[in-house]
Amino acid sequence: MDAYELLDVGDGARLERFGDRVVDRPHPAILGARSDPTLWKEADLVYDRGRGWRGPDAGSPWQVRVDGLTLELRPTDAGQVGLFPEQAPSWRWLRERVRERDSPTVLDLFAYTGASTLALADEGAAVAHVDASKPTVAWARRNSELSGLADRPIRWFVDDAVAFIERERRRGRRYDGVVVDPPSYGHGAGGRTWRLDGGLERLLESCAELVGGSAGFVLLTTHSVGWTTDRLADVLAATFGLMPSDIEAGELAVEARTGQRLELGAYARWGGG
């Protein structure tokens, strides 16, 4: 992905290039020393827990191009910028699944700023984009406009993922695919509390009822500590009634220019058929 490069890692932080801006932000799992300390002087934005962002452009958004999409990035209070580059292979995988089907309908849960939704829509899918944060859904819609996809069949929902799925089940709605990227913990609409441990299995069981048989597909990703590739694959197979051999699983990771590999999460997916 030309819009992104992991420049270096070390001392509990990562140095990244998003388009034309270099970002220095912490990551607790990073141990060891920095490979090239001089690189870190190039940072345009630096995030410190407790103090927030600093730098000349700390409050301003910017844009990057990702696989034909235009996405707006901006510093958030949580130390994010609106893009998870380790998901880039997942977005390409989703595009391939859409190309194999005739105008599929896809459910995107915990959909954040819309990169998965827009990759799906760009290939011709009709997408239900669901996220509990109103500002985040507005950000995703902004990305659809920047990418020239505002007229595509995307339904935008500010809603709790579990509650949304339950309503879709009662309505008898069906989908050809589902994308699930749940957080470890969160608060949904109506004061609902979400916990990945204890909640994921029930969520996936409900998703399985919405996906249309062997022709469907599912992508499950997480950045939560303790959810290994094997664990994700096992729960996906169990809830969708699949054999473990049907599931493809791996790590969400990026490799730095200096050679280090940064593991940021895990995925499990089933392409249908």
Image (tube, helix red, strand yellow):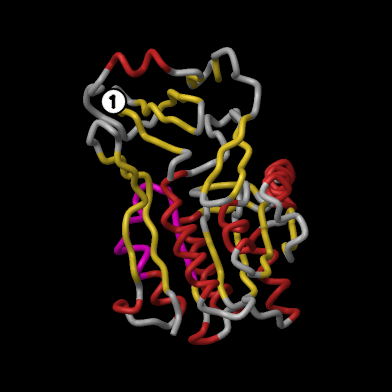
Where does label 1 land, which residue?
10
Which quadrant holds the N terminus? top left
Q: Residue at x 51, y 78 (%)?
A: 100
Q: Does the magenta stretch include residue 176?
A: no
Residue situated in front as seen by the camera: 249 or 115: 115
Q: Residue at x 32, y 44 (%)?
A: 263
On screen, residue 17 above or below 204:
above
Q: Give the quarter of the image for residue 246.
A: bottom left
Q: Residues within 10 Å of mark 1 (few under 14, many from 20)?
A: some
On screen, residue 242 above or below 52:
below
The answer to whether 254 appears left or right of 61 in the picture is left
The answer to whether 7 appears left or right of 160 in the picture is left
Q: What stretch is highlighted in magenta?
A: 218-234
Residue situated in front as seen by the camera: 100 or 52: 100
Q: Where is residue 151 in the image (x, y as percent from the top left)?
A: 77, 59
Residue situated in front as seen by the camera: 42 or 165: 42
For the residue marked with disc 1, what is the amino acid?
Gly
Which quadrant holds the C terminus? bottom left
Q: Does the magenta stretch include residue 233?
A: yes
Q: Which residue is drawn at 48% across and 86% down?
A: 214
On screen, residue 32 above or below 113:
above
Q: Position of residue 111 (x, y in %)?
A: 60, 54
Count up the numbered dots.
Answer: 1
Q: Position of residue 184 (x, y in %)?
A: 49, 49
